[in-house]
Image (tube, helix red, strand yellow):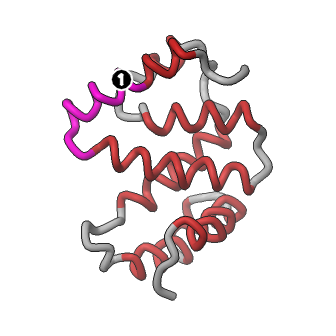
Amino acid sequence: MNVPSPETNRAVRMFQHQMEEQYPGSRRHYERVAVYAVATAERLGFGPDGLTHLRIASELRKLDPGLIESLGFEELDLRLEAVLELCDQFESRRTPDCQGDDERLRWLRSEARASFDPAHVDALESVQSLIQPTGT
């Protein structure tokens, strides 16, 4: 897979607008998830094709699962899907005023390790401090 075509990029933007209409506020959430997921996967050594696929998959996650495939992408690699799920759960713990950031970090350092690959958790923790420095 190469860089998405202009048509694919237009389709992604159209579907993002559709998702925002169906789920208000979701676009910002999934854009943040995409930032965390791509940075985490890059830290884990995934290449450009996987990172591009992951970015699109994260931003369109709430829509029909077949949608990403209809844009010409194969099913997301299971390891990338696991990274995406970890980042989605981490971002879902965000509070509007960011007062819960210490709680999010505690979740990442404890509960997340029981449910996700520790290497993925370590990678997310290392990039999280670069993306949004917080708390302890």
| Residue denoted by label 1 | 15
Does the magenta segment cover residue 124? Answer: no
Q: Is residue 116 above or below residue 133?
A: above
Residue 53 lies, in percent from the top left, at 61, 30
Q: Is residue 67 above or below residue 127?
A: above
Residue sticking out furthest to the front? 6
Q: Is residue 121 above or below residue 63?
A: below
Q: Assign the N terminus to one quadrant of the image.
A: top right
| Residue at point 40%, 26% (across, down) | 13
Tell whether 27 sits left or right of 3. left
Q: Nearer the viewer, residue 92 or 133?
A: 133
Residue 75 lies, in percent from the top left, at 60, 23
| Residue at point 35%, 23% (across, down) | 15
Count of numbered circles on the image:
1
- The residue under label 1 is which amino acid type? Phe
Q: Is residue 49 above or below residue 124?
A: above
